[in-house]
Image (spheres, rainbow, N blue to C red):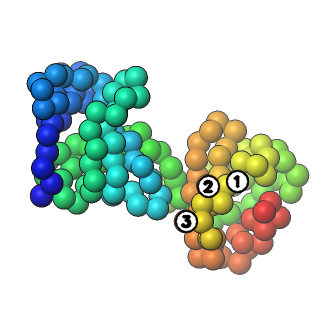
Amino acid sequence: MAEITFQLQRNAFGRLVLTDAKGVSHEGVSPVRAFPIAAPDEGVSIVAVNGEELAWIESLASFPANLRDLVTTELAAREFMPTITRLKRVSSFATPSTWTVDTDRGETSFVLRGEEDIRHLGKHSLLIADSHSIQFLIADVLALDKTSRKLLDRFL
């Protein structure tokens, strides 16, 4: 177990409160992953409302279960990033275009404004931002079916 120099809890309004080693309480703190895709359980910062880092969690696995659950619940609420599992159709191969996709959260449609909204994260991973700035992840392009890869290739 890692040494913990702070306390973390929810207040009556459901907001996270961090109490540091000096006993100072910081209300409305947020956990932020350093590497949300490459290493989601390593390197989590607890930041104040103004963005100042108050605490660092090297590894969530080494954190006590009650605090780990509190942090991961808060992260899940902040990090809405559906994973695309299949491209069903695109309205046009020119942008903007409407994409209909299957995700790990069900079928959805979104508007891709331009090819610049598709970012490479690694050799086979992509992050796609829709017109409302919702991020969609394709964890492994090679894991997509042939039709999905063919549709996607038109935009890469």
146 sits left or right of 62 in the view: right
What residue is disc 3 on?
Answer: 139
Snapshot quadrant of residue 48:
top left
**Residue furthest front in the image:** 22
95 sits left or right of 63 in the view: right
**Which residue is pictured at 23% across the width and 60% down the height?**
61
Residue 72 visible at all: yes
Q: CA distance from mark 3 to mark 2?
A: 8 Å
**In the structure shown, which secondary structural element does the residue marked by tag 1 occupy?**
strand
Residue 101 visible at all: no
What residue is disc 2 on?
Answer: 127
Q: Kindly identify the amino acid type of the residue bearing the numbered disc 3.
A: Ala
Mark sitting on residue 109: none
Between 105 and 79, the residue placed more toward the observer is 79
Q: Earlier in the sequence, mark 1 or mark 3?
A: 1
Snapshot quadrant of residue 120:
bottom right
Position of residue 51 relative to residue 3, above or below, is above
Position of residue 55 relative to residue 34, above or below, is above
Q: Earlier in the sequence, mark 3 or mark 2?
A: 2
What residue is disc 1 on?
Answer: 118
Between 124 and 112, the residue placed more toward the observer is 124
CB contact under 8 Å: marks 2 and 1: yes
Callout 2 crowding tier (Cα within 10 Å): few <14, some 14–19, many ≥20 = many
106 sits left or right of 50 in the view: right
Tell me where residue 54 appears, x and y as whole percent.
28, 33
Q: Kindly identify the amino acid type of the residue bearing the numbered disc 2.
A: Leu
CB contact under 8 Å: marks 1 and 3: no
Tell me where residue 16 appears, x and y as whole percent.
25, 30
